[in-house]
Image (cartoon, rainbow, N blue to C red):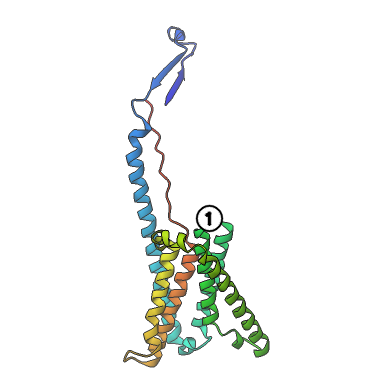
Amino acid sequence: MKNRLNLSHPHTPLLQNFPTLELRSPYHLSDFQPFSLELMSYTSKIRTLALTFFIVGLLAISSSLSFEAWQLAPHVTAENALLELAQGGFLLLAAMFQGLRAFNSHDSGLKRDIRLGLALFAFALFLREVDINKLGDRATWGALENILRASALLMMLGFTFHMSRRIKSFIANISKILLAPTVVLSVLACVLYACGWPFDRELFNIDKGLSKWFEETLELNACLLFLCAGMVGNIKTVVVKIQAPSF
């Protein structure tokens, strides 16, 4: 916290006897630490709020586009039609993002395990949503579907065995895991999936086509949330360092 000012100008001979002038600040960085912590808290809250508004807006746009597509062509809610293929695409991207974040980040231990678990879960939902054997020749695409399903099952069994050895660590950190942004978004996605179940069973006294649209749209938004969960990282903010002024 020291500033040195050289005053050796030729037009100031009287000051040449003082080669340096040392100035000390009466303030210290510790005086600004409470403001740094408060600023850190506000920054984290602002980022969380911005992320919330972005995701809500994204879901609103998705629902609007889905409704417009259904108005123009009601068959978009059919099996393996536009909405289901869009869901499968979002889920496949979600699985890829979660897997890439798990292997390319510096995180290890439970953080990586959670990413891998969510990647496998998204991939399993992709296999559920898309009837791969109906995308083309039944023999070729059917064989591909069986291979992917068998691979997913083997990976899930391996992951389950791996997590069984870390169950104590998982339980000890369950509160932190549930508050992680990627887990929160994944849980909300599961809630949207659950909300689509009554429309799938046609439990409400509404038009059958409208009930189908509600089901597919809720699942579409759930898949979007899974994709957001794969893209979002941990919302962290380091303490902002504020330099003390010098006088």
In the image shown, does 133 or 166 lie closer to the viewer?
Answer: 166
Residue 60: x and y in percent read: 39, 73
* 239 displayed left or right of 156: left
Residue 121: x and y in percent read: 51, 73
- Up/down of 154 relative to 209, above or below: above
Q: Which residue is under mark 1?
A: 107
Residue 173 visible to the viewer: no
- Up/down of 65 relative to 116, above or below: below
In the image shown, does 243 or 6 lie closer to the viewer?
Answer: 243
Q: Residue at x 31, y 92 (%)?
A: 205
Q: Secondary structure at mark 1?
A: loop
Q: Residue at x 42, y 62 (%)?
A: 171
Q: Residue at x 43, y 7 (%)?
A: 14
Q: Quadrant of the C terminus?
A: top left
Residue 221: x and y in percent read: 43, 75
Residue 195 visible to the viewer: yes
Quadrant of the rendered image containing residue 175 = bottom left
Q: Amino acid at mark 1?
A: Asp
* 47 displayed left or right of 78: left
